[in-house]
Amino acid sequence: MMLARRFSRLRLSSLMLVLCAGFSASALAHNPMCECKAIDAEQIKCTGGFSDGSGAPGVTLDVIGYDETILVPGKLGADSTLTFKKPGAEFYVLFDAGPGHVVEIDQADIEAP
């Protein structure tokens, strides 16, 4: 009886370990990603998604001034992109897919055409 109880605990411990490993792997599979590139001197195109390859249509992508005012409110389109006119003021881009899924891109990090 004692051997059977020990075996059951070992199986339960092993099962819990496998389940925890599975949940942590799935949590890591959805890291947010966002990239912005200048199309020309006046237009910037940002593309958002997740590290598992899924897109992010409808996710909020705002262009925010250094004074924290929203210069260009936006949402990613069906193709997970948003194109906007480059603001005259200093800015950063905020991709916000919810708690723990936020990416900030400073204007200095946006690739030139």
Image (spheres, helix red, strand yellow):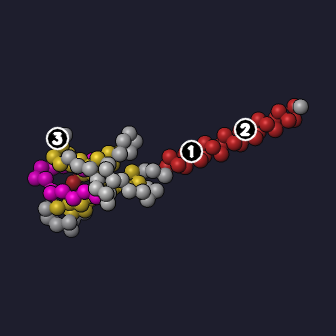
Q: Which residue is mark 1?
A: 23
Report which residue position mark 2 lands on.
12
For the residue marked with disc 3, what is the amino acid?
A: Thr
Q: How many marks?
A: 3
Mark 3 vs 2: CB contact within 8 A? no
Q: In the structure shown, which secondary structural element does the residue marked by tag 1 occupy?
A: helix
Mark number for residue 49? Answer: none
Residue 13 x, y percent position in the rendering: 71, 38
Q: Quadrant of the N terminus?
A: top right
> In the rendered image, is residue 35 in sight?
no
Measured as percent of width and height from the top left, residue 30 is found at 45, 50
* Residue type, mark 1 in image: Phe
In the rendered image, residue 86 lying in the magenta stretch gets the answer yes
What is the crowding at mark 1: few (fewer than 14 residues within 10 Å), some, or many (at least 20)?
few
Residue range in magenta is 81-94
Residue under label 3: 69
Secondary element type, mark 2: helix
Distance from the alpha carbon under mark 1 to that under mark 3: 38 Å
On screen, residue 86 versus residue 75, left or right, reads: left
Q: Which residue sits furthest left?
A: 88
Sort mark 2 into few (<14), some (14-19) or many (20+) by Cα contacts within 10 Å.
Answer: few
Sequence order check, earlier mark of 3 and 2: 2
Q: Residue at x 38, y 56 (%)?
A: 55
In which image quadrant can residue 86 be found? Answer: bottom left
Q: Is residue 24 left or right of residue 106?
A: right
Tell me which numbered mark, 1 or 2, is placed earlier along the sequence.
2
Asked which secondary structure carries label 3, the reply is: loop
